[in-house]
Amino acid sequence: DSEKNKYLNKTNDELSGIEKFKFYCDVYSAIAKKYGNFFEHYFKNIESIIQYVDSSKMDIVRQNYIQILLSQLSNYEIIGLYYYCLGSPLSNKLVGLIQQYNIFKDLRKDDLWEQDDIDEMWRLRCNNLGI
């Protein structure tokens, strides 16, 4: 309870970048504890597909298959993938592949909870993993 309150006592503008990042991770963790069995397997399947495509030896094939995969995802599925990558410790391998293939390049920021911080949050996540 005291963990939740440390965020509630500050406005969004008063939170530092790392505090916002930790907040997103805490929110994801709380949602995953309650509902993770409904969606985490979905993101693990996407990760498996991207890993399989990444194993191809031909660059043009990789890019084409990544584009085919992305064309099958709605904007809301990509947003869910973004939050999964941001907050889930299960997504560490996937974050590197997302970065490598620039999968979030067309992410519609206006549909995210906190549009102004998307680039900073992603940078912090990648830095956290040494990417």
Image (cartoon, helix red, strand yellow):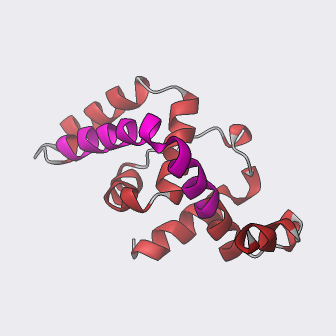
Tell me, yes or no, if residue 106 can be seen here: no
Q: Is residue 64 above or below residue 32?
A: above
Q: Residue 61's image quarter?
A: top left
Image mark count: 0
User: Whole-percent x and y of residue 79?
Assistant: 57, 40
Q: Residue 64's image quarter?
A: top left
Span of residues in magenta: 25-52
User: Whole-percent x and y of residue 7?
Assistant: 79, 69
User: Whole-percent x and y of residue 115?
Assistant: 73, 50
Look at 42% across and 62% down and name the residue there.
89
* Outermost residue, left side: 57
* Outermost residue, front side: 1
Look at 41% across and 73% down and name the residue there.
129
- Image quadrant where one finds the C terminus: bottom left
- Image quadrant where one finds the N terminus: bottom right
User: Whole-percent x and y of residue 14?
Assistant: 86, 73
Look at 49% across and 49% down and name the residue there.
84
Task: Give the left or right position of residue 9, taking residue 130 as reference.
Answer: right
Look at 79% across and 74% down and name the residue there.
6
Tell me, yes or no, if residue 68 can be seen here: yes
Residue 56 part of the magenta segment: no
Q: Residue 15's image quarter?
A: bottom right
Q: Is residue 96 above or below residue 130?
A: above
Residue 33 part of the magenta segment: yes
Q: Is residue 77 above or below residue 1?
A: above
Please tell me which residue lies in front, 85 or 118.
Answer: 85
Task: Give the left or right position of residue 35, taking residue 102 as reference.
Answer: right
Task: State the predominant SS element of the stretch in magenta.
Answer: helix
